[in-house]
Image (tube, grey):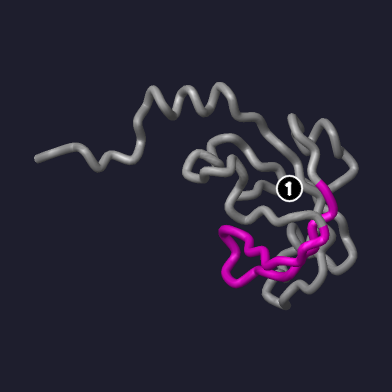
Amino acid sequence: MARDNIYWDLPSVHEKLKEATNYCVKYKIGWVNRNCWHKQFKTRLYRGNTICAECQPEATLHRSNSRCASDLEDGEQGFWKLIGPKSCNGMWTRIGRDDNCHCSQKHPDLDPFLLV
């Protein structure tokens, strides 16, 4: 069986990871659906709250623009969805991006999440 359809070319992936860096994006939460009822999320994901979403290099490997798939441009409004809790989603607006960033270090005052 031919193996010419393998997605992960390990030397290529290794090189991309060496060059890639984390970045942080600040989003202002807009609409949140009522299925985000769990206390862990309800105290972080509410209308008007600003959060920090971190994009890690591994999440950008399949993209040609080195960005997380769910990232937007500044000022754009988009849809977010939590992975895990069923049907916890909403709308947010992108405020800005910080390169070479970890949410816990650069924005410790904001609730941290991961972009995928």
- Mark 1 Cα shell of 10 Å, populated few (<14), some (14-19), many (≥20): many
Does residue 43 show up? no
Q: Is residue 114 above or below residue 93?
A: above
Q: Where does residue 3 sit, x and y in percent of width and height?
A: 18, 37
**In-image side of 72 versus 2 (left or right):** right
Q: Which residues are magenta?
A: 75-96
Q: Is residue 85 above or below residue 62?
A: below
In this image, 61 relative to 107: left or right? left
Is 2 magenta? The answer is no
Residue 35 visible? The answer is: yes
Quadrant of res 6: top left
Amino acid type for the residue under numbered disc 1: Ala
Q: Position of residue 61 (x, y in %)?
A: 50, 39
Residue 2 pos. (x, y %): 13, 39
Q: Which residue is mark 1?
A: 53
Name the residue: 61% across, 47% down.
68
